[in-house]
């Protein structure tokens, strides 16, 4: 089957009945770029910028960051690249920042919460990103947004830095897309309001599932609660997608679920626009999509959300459809 996938490398991502989707890759460092270029991905849906902060014993300079971001957009050669501002905190500690020890790190001082407080760090990162935008198709997204106020504050700071750079005569991209992660239940529930204020959403299911079920994503003892196929979680994701589309906002998913072969048919049925996954899953997913009739998947997703009571029931429904197509 590998050989069959190989032929799909340069082909567009379309379902059996001709509906288009976009398949992108997730990366952690620019060292992952060669694998992405070979993977058949149509872009990068999540560039986790944490490595710049973690592979160092001090905060990375604007120049160091600029070089890494520029390399990514240049090597992708005009294909879209979405870079996420830093998501430090939670389980990712930075010894040199002396972050406070917390009882509940996943519910604590993390990601955009740090960026809005430590604006020196945030502004440095945004300047590097805005400068890199001149060299390709760059999107910037904010992690762990919970409220509109956070989003607006982040956007204001972005606009201030961009204006300063433009006034200083620095070349910047004509249209830098701004987006946010949907990975906190409150952001998902409030999606209609957020959708009016961003160019795109990217659903981070790794955290969204953890927070929806109150089950630590890395704790084996409670892993039975970590349920990507649960009807209520699917309903929440569907709500996010429909809310976004009502406002002309596109929706990507960059959590592990986007490359999960059971979840993909359900997500296609909900109308998810972009699936961002590990580079090694791209061709397998393109092949799966090619064999599915997208028009029948709307009913599949609806049945999963409305008629099922458990993850097992949803799974059985998807398996039945897959064997029939
Ligand atoms: C997510 O939460 O789904 C996500 C993509 O972000 P991370 O895994 O980096 O927390
Ligand atoms: Mg996350």
Image (cartoon, helix red, strand yellow):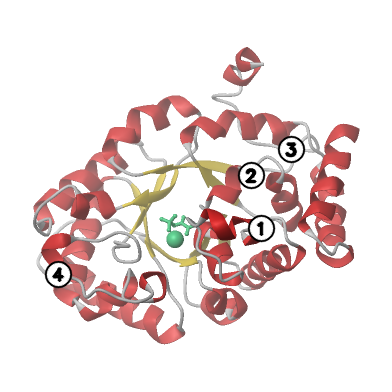
* 217 lies above or below 285: below
> In whole angstroms, how far apart are the C-alphas of marks 4 and 3?
49 Å
Of marks 2 and 4, which one's residue comes earlier in the chain?
2
Q: Residues within 10 Å of mark 1 (few under 14, many from 20)?
A: some
> In whole angstroms, how far apart are the C-alphas of marks 3 and 2?
8 Å
Using the image, tell me which numbered label, if any, was put on residue 98: 4
Kindly report which numbered mark, 1 or 3, lies closer to the viewer in this rendering: 1
Residue identified by numbered label 2: 21
Query: Which sits in the foreground, 271 or 282?
Result: 282
Of marks 4 and 3, which one's residue comes earlier in the chain?
3
Residue 177 quadrant? bottom left
* 184 lies above or below 320: below
Secondary structure under tag 2 reads loop
> In whole angstroms, how far apart are the C-alphas of marks 2 and 4?
43 Å
Secondary structure under tag 1 reads loop
Residue identified by numbered label 3: 15
Q: Are marks 2 and 4 in contact (CB under 8 Å)?
A: no
Of marks 1 and 2, which one's residue comes earlier in the chain?
2
Secondary structure under tag 3 reads loop
Kindly report which numbered mark, 2 or 4, lies closer to the viewer in this rendering: 4
Give left or right: position of 31 versus 254.
left
Residue 14 quadrant? top right
Q: Residue extending furthest bottom? A: 149
Of marks 1 and 4, which one's residue comes earlier in the chain?
4
Q: Are marks 3 and 2 in contact (CB under 8 Å)?
A: yes
Residue 4 in the image, given as x and y percentages of width and height = 65, 16
Q: Are marks 1 and 4 in contact (CB under 8 Å)?
A: no
Residue identified by numbered label 1: 227
């Amino acid at each position: 089957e590998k050989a069959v996938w190989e032929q799909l490398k340069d082909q567009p991502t379309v379902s059996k009945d001709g509906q288009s989707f976009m398949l992108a890759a997730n990366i952690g460092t620019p060292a992952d770029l060669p694998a992405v270029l070979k993977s058949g991905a149509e872009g990068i849906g999540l560039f986790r910028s944490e490595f710049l902060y973690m592979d160092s014993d001090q905060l990375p300079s604007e120049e160091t960051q600029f070089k890494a971001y520029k390399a990514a957009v240049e090597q992708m050669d005009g294909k879209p690249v979405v870079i996420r501002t830093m998501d430090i905190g939670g389980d990712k500690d930075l010894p040199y920042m002396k972050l406070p020890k917390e009882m509940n790190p996943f519910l604590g001082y993390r990601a955009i919460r740090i960026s809005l407080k430590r604006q020196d760090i945030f502004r440095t990162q945004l300047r590097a990103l805005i400068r890199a935008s001149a060299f390709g198709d760059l999107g910037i997204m904010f992690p762990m947004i919970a409220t509109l106020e956070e989003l607006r504050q982040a956007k204001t700071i972005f606009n201030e830095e961009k204006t300063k750079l433009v006034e200083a005569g620095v070349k910047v991209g004509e249209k830098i897309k701004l987006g946010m992660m949907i990975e906190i239940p409150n952001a998902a529930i409030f999606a209609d309001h957020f959708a009016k204020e961003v160019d795109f959403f990217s659903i981070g299911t790794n955290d969204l599932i953890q927070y929806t079920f109150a089950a630590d994503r890395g704790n084996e003892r409670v892993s039975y609660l970590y349920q990507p196929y649960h009807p209520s979680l699917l309903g929440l994701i569907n709500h996010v997608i429909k809310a976004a589309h009502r406002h002309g906002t596109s929706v990507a998913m960059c959590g592990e679920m986007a490359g999960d072969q059971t979840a993909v048919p359900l997500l296609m049925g909900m109308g998810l626009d972009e699936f961002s996954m590990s580079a090694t899953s791209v061709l397998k997913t393109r092949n799966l999509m090619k064999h599915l009739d997208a028009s029948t998947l709307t009913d599949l997703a609806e049945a999963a959300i409305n008629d099922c009571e458990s993850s097992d029931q949803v799974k059985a429904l998807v398996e039945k459809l897959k064997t029939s197509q």
